[in-house]
Amino acid sequence: MKRKIAAIFAADIAGYSRLVAEDEEETLRRLASYREVVDDFIAKAGGRIFNTAGDAVLAEFPSAVDAVRCAIDIQESLRTRNMAYPPSRQMSFRIGITIGDVVERDGDLLGDGVNIAARLEGLAEVGGICVSRGVHEQVANKLSVQFADIGAQEVKNIPTPVHAYMVAMRREDGAYAKPQLKKPASKMAAAPVWIWPLAVAIVSIVAIVVTGSLYNTKLKHAASAAAPVAVPSATPTAMAATPSPMPTQMVKAPMTPPNAGAAMAPMPAPSPSPMTGKLAADSVPFINERARNYVAGDYSAAAGYKAFALNVGGFIGSALNQPTEEAARNTALEQCQKRADAAQSPRRCELYAVGSNVVYTHGKPPMPPQPWVRHDAITEKPFASKDFPIVRSAAKVRIENMFAPAAKSRSIALGPTGHYFMVLGASSVDEAVRRSLESCGAIAGVACMVVAVDDNFVVPIPTSFRITGFFNAASNASIVAEARGEVVRKLGDTMGWTAVAVGTSGRAGLGLKAADEQTAVTSALADCAKRDSDCHVIAIGPFTVGPIN
């Protein structure tokens, strides 16, 4: 037997016995289909399934980040799949995740880590995720995920309470549900303690003194984590007497959990490795061309102690000719943070380079393959904030107020779960596009997609269906696995409007090279009807779609 520390993932289906009792054959068929989705995501995230029983799945992951990202991907994918069924027949998993010491025996894992993960799964909401405090500490600063602290929970066969957190999950309307707080386990600290003094009788006098105290201890549980608010930055300003230029105006989206999902949309990227090596100006992310020229020129040529700092929003700071390396570090960070604070940027500045060596800990931001923008006169249309996909109403107001009237060149990149990043007033379209993708990717943790450039949407924006996420034919669970490769191949670099429909067996029908949205939809449904039944549209252009409520 071998001991090890692992992130343990436990999942089962809520109300599975009822579903089987109502329709055993249909439930078992769907369970096999849903398990295929779960197994695919676990394998792609580097996990290993070590035990299954009926509707339950136990898996191990090398890191908590991989486990939580995989869990979110699974829940988002299955939520979309469940939309095709009435609420009473939806098949939803609950997932629990912890980090713990486990014993490996013949491929199986045993120990408290496995038991706690199973108990956390029982605490999770239907379609939700519950994690231990250890997982929360590992993930909180690495994934854009909101948590609700539900406090210490007493669970079966675990001697001490388990401190747990709920993960905020996306609702059908695209908003993020506030996890329901479960009341933490609480006990009275002690039963009443009465202290009776000795009774001393010397003639006929008895003195009785009664003292007592009652102590009540109440456990408190925290409210759900407050959602960050998007904050616009300052208008571009001319560089003062400082060696590094100020970035152009930007805005970022709220922190929200990532999503599974995206044939034309970018795929999620693995966790980035720290960036090391010699400083190369062309490789510095987030910054504008003026700052890049400064790095290639003045900064690179300077001798002595020096440092360069930046943040995701593109703000920078630098220090040259300092007396010590520590002074260079501190000065660069302070200069960068002052600029970020002045623009009300919520992102902290970090060291990117010390001397000529890169020390940035977050690695390169995930980026989609080039070309980043493909112009298509058939699908492009004038930009209108009301049609901006996925984001909530408040974000559309910000976009209307900031993007539409801003100076060119400007670009908005969008992530699959509603993260977005605007770059305004850039020196060129190429710069605006690159920077919006870099910053959006760093915030979202996955590659984003450019949705708008200057005055136009540069991707097809469906209006006859509700956009629910990014479409990726290669991993879309609604399409039967053996057909996904053909769908990817046929979509390829197709121009014009495209649509994908599937039936009850997951056979896909395609509408390709259409002149408008409705023609693509009609063609996809007709193509699907040739090989499947009860066909419905699941994607238009780069987006997954559902019916308009």
Image: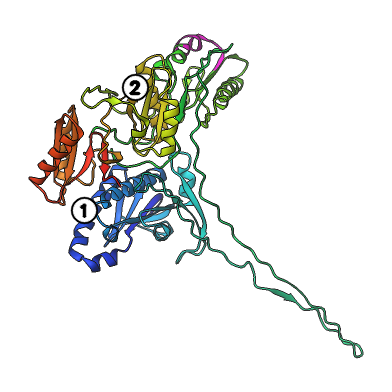
Q: CA distance from mark 1 to mark 2?
A: 43 Å
Residue sitting at 10 percent across and 42 percent down? 526
Whether residue 245 is in magenta: the answer is no
Dominant secondary-structure state across the stretch colored magenta: helix
What amino acid does circle 1 point to?
Ser
Does 305 appear in magenta? yes
Looking at the image, can residue 175 be seen? yes
Q: Nearer the viewer, residue 268 or 352?
A: 268
Q: Is residue 363 above or below residue 194?
A: above
Residue 363 visible at all: no
Q: For the point 87% across and 87% down, which residue is it?
A: 201
Above/below status of 375 relative to 253: above
In the rendered view, does 453 fall on the left or right side of 401? left
Quadrant where the image shows the N terminus: bottom left
Magenta range? 294-306
Q: Position of residue 495 (x, y in %)?
A: 18, 26
Residue at x 29% of width, y 35% of height? 267
Q: Earlier in the sequence, mark 1 or mark 2?
A: 1
- Residue 506 x %, y %: 16, 48
Q: Which residue is mark 1?
A: 33
Residue 149, given in percent of the width and then of the height, sits at 51, 52
From the viewer's side, name the closer residue of 446 and 407: 407
What residue did someone put label 2 on? 455
Answer with left or right where residue 441 lies relative to residue 164.
left
In the image, residue 292 sits, relative to residue 227, either above or below, namely: above
Q: Residues within 10 Å of mark 1 (few under 14, many from 20)?
A: some
Query: Residue at horizontal 44%, vertical 43%?
Result: 145
- Disc number lying in front (1 or 2): 2
Find residue 375 and report its image quarter: top left
